[in-house]
Amino acid sequence: MPKSSIVTTDYQDPDVDLNVTAADPHAMDPVLSMSDGIEAGEIVTSTDERGASTNSSVELDRTTHTPELITWSARLKQFARPTGYYVLSRLLVLFAALASKWLVPRLHPLKALTSGWDGYWYTLIAQHGYPHQLFNENHGSRWAFFPAYPAAIRATVATTGLSYAHATLLLSFVLGLTSTLAIWLAVRQIFGPVVADRSVLLYVFFPASYVLSMAYTEGLFITAVGACLYALARRYWITAALFAVLGSLTRSFGVVLIACVIVTAIPAILKQRKLRPLVALVISPLGFLAWLAYSWAAVGNPLAFLSAEKLWGHSHFVWFLTPILSLLRVATSVQSWHQGAVVLAAVALVIAYGGFVLLAKARDRGVAIPLFWWVFTVGSILGMMSSYEPVSVLRYSLAVIPLFAAYAWRMRPSWEGPVVGVLAFSQGVLAVVIFVGTLYPHSAQLWP
């Protein structure tokens, strides 16, 4: 490769010119300066939005590639569109909050956003930590919730001096943005920038994405997911392992990220005899193992998070049947259409099935989808289906980001407006129902 050419690619999209040289750093990878990246001379391939191989070639020649070539303006410029999409979607949620206040004057929008539903438990953990025994705390238990998000709330309070409510609101906005950018990076690496833009558009306006403005783990967890998948694609081994640690400390099926690191690192260890994949293999499960050890030391039960879930209305493992049963009920009983949670669980299952089929078609059309993407897709779909209550299924589907990429790959430009319009309207309606439901939980059957 000539010294003057650092990145070459043959994307054929008429709207995107990605011919890059050293004189044009604006299309360069925004995090190529990370120390645990691809080895010198290693080749990375990706595909365009139609699924055709781009045969992208990235050579990290340490004599020619320096972080100084990548300006901050170049780093930020490529994030402008996904950031704009995210901000517009948050304005939609703000409008829904104000509409809820208009419908129910005694509703406090800030309280609904920061301490409604599970937000109450996360704030309680951030303020007081976990109890030293496992018991029913007002029809629930703090031990059902993983520690990363409450720790982030407490850290935000400590660093900003804000109240817990305002710190949680700020944190939710920031993590929603980082999750959006992480998804964009992960999808761009496999499908190219056009599909990445569309994936983000579908993600931020997805009906369940109102939770990105609430005190929920989605923003933090999806940030970890997107960053881990991106890092694995770039062979940033240590970075991928650290985000797997973060994901497994945020939500129980964050362990799927550990599996992604394992299936990617083992071939590199066996075939290429590299040290960093081995280090990543060791690091990735440490967060989850530490959480199990802490639970064991505190309450004598390493699986306290599973035992605590039983304190919510006899919750138990149902072998991934909840969305399947919901779909059967919707298909066979008109009365089930009056149960919003059941309908949404059925919709989530249909979306997951359709997205998986499209992902397989993208592979058949030549998109080089790596093994760890399939591992994460299958694992996260099973995690979505593992919910005992139908009310959580649609929200859990938000984390299955390969599905957004699959639909974005198939979606034509002329479909973007109508599809996003329907999604945005659905998100706004759901947000109003959720906010009003914080005051009247029995008045609606739709909640996160």
Image (spheres, rainbow, N blue to C red):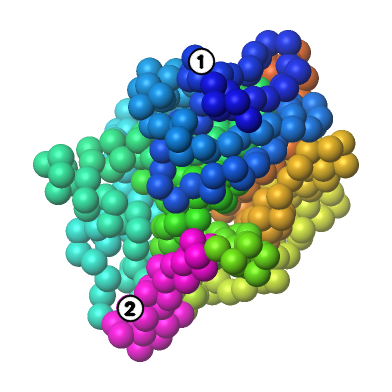
Q: Quadrant of residue 219?
A: top left
Residue 116 visible within the image: no
| Quadrant in which the N terminus is drawn | top right
Marker disc for residue 294 = 2
**Residue found at the far top of this picture:** 14
Name above or below for residue 245 compared with residue 98: below
Q: Amino acid at mark 1?
A: Asp
Q: Amino acid at mark 2?
A: Tyr
Q: Is residue 207 left or right of residue 172?
A: right
Foreground disc of the pair 2, 1: 1
Marker disc for residue 299 = none
Instruction: Decide whether residue 51 is among the magenta residues.
Output: no
Start and end of the magenta stretch? 275-304
Neighbourhood count class around disc 2 (C-alpha, 10 Å): few under 14, some 14–19, many 20 upward: some
Name above or below for residue 182 compared with residue 133: above
Question: Where does label 1 land, which residue?
Answer: 24
Where residue 445 sits in the image (x, y, percent)?
A: 56, 47
Where residue 169 sits in the image (x, y, percent)?
A: 30, 37
Q: Residue at x 28, y 43 (%)?
A: 168
Q: Residue at x 60, y 35 (%)?
A: 58
Name above or below for residue 155 compared with residue 161: below
